[in-house]
Image (cartoon, rainbow, N blue to C red):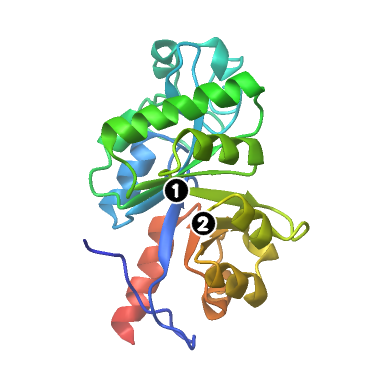
Amino acid sequence: MLILRYRIIHTDKADILIIYGHRGAKGEAPENTISGFSLASRNGIRHFELDVQLSKDNKLMVLHDIRVDRTTDRRGKISEFTSSELSKMDARRNVAPWPTFQMIPSLENVMENSPDCQHFQFEVKTERSATGIDRICKELDRLFKEKDYYQNASVTSSDTRILKKIKQINPNIKTGLVAEYRVPNPVKKAKRLGCHHLCAKWTIISPKIIEEAKKDGMAVSAWTVNRIQDVVHLKRMGIDSVITDYPTSMLAYFDKHRAES
């Protein structure tokens, strides 16, 4: 299986760095839409981060917010609409002009339209009751089993209840802790939860955090990194991957400098 590789200039380490498209390609196309994932995929991106919510009829849908207000011309919680109703909403609001209608897609729809993707991070948000957590984790379990996503996807969250529940239901699903703060120690927390990944806000990442995570067998992913110089800085520290709003621009930059080096 081909892995995206390139050399980052002016660093001491020139091995693999993976670029994840944040919500598809949030800075280059409407977020969490088929067009966003397709645009990035056509330009060489093979790894994506996206957000998963449950619809009224218990379908896994790809949307960041618990409400549809910010990205569509409708108002209300995603849980108040069926998957069919959500698919008819135009998800182009609050972004740069985009020429064509963009529906809120289901998770299966995104996966089916991303055949070249090597790995997804499915982030599950925290705004849920215990019943809601149980429902979404069971749906993710069903999807992993039906589609055999074990090597192609991980479930990530900042909510420890979600990470514990998904492991309880299906220990074979790889998980990642989304960390925004240095305290409590994110590596120790992720290890206790049995995580395979630490997905940390890029500003809290340090060489010590990366070293500790790798000692425990965890890959470290930094979010959301939109400046080239910050990616270079993180690479010097030994980061495994970065999540960016501008994946195709980021890849094009490094590909250009690789060709020139």
Q: Which mark is residue 76?
A: none
Residue 168 position, x and y percent, is: 52, 36
Q: Is residue 55 above or below residue 43?
A: above
Query: 120 or 160: nearer the eye?
Result: 160
Q: CA distance from mark 1 to mark 2?
A: 8 Å
Q: Is residue 221 above or below residue 63?
A: below
Residue indicated by mark 2: 197
SS for callout 2: strand
Q: Quadrant of residue 108?
A: top left
- Whether residue 91 appears in this view of the structure is no
SS for callout 1: loop
Identified at 42% across, 15% down, the residue is 83
Give the side of residue 239 with respect to residue 139, left or right. Answer: right
Figure quadrant of the C terminus: bottom left
Q: Is residue 140 above or below residue 155?
A: above
Marks 1 and 2, the one that precedes in the sequence: 1
Q: Quadrant of residue 8?
A: bottom left
Disc 1 to disc 2: CB gap under 8 Å: yes
Residue 88 position, x and y percent, is: 40, 15
Q: Amino acid at mark 2?
A: His
Query: 62 or 143: nearer the eye?
Result: 143
Q: Amino acid at mark 1?
A: Lys
In the current view of this chain or complex, which residue is farthest to the right? Answer: 183
Q: Residues within 10 Å of mark 1 (few under 14, many from 20)?
A: many
Figure quadrant of the N terminus: bottom left
Query: 184 or 249: nearer the eye?
Result: 184
Q: Which mark is residue 174?
A: 1
Give the side of residue 52 with respect to residue 209, left or right. Answer: left
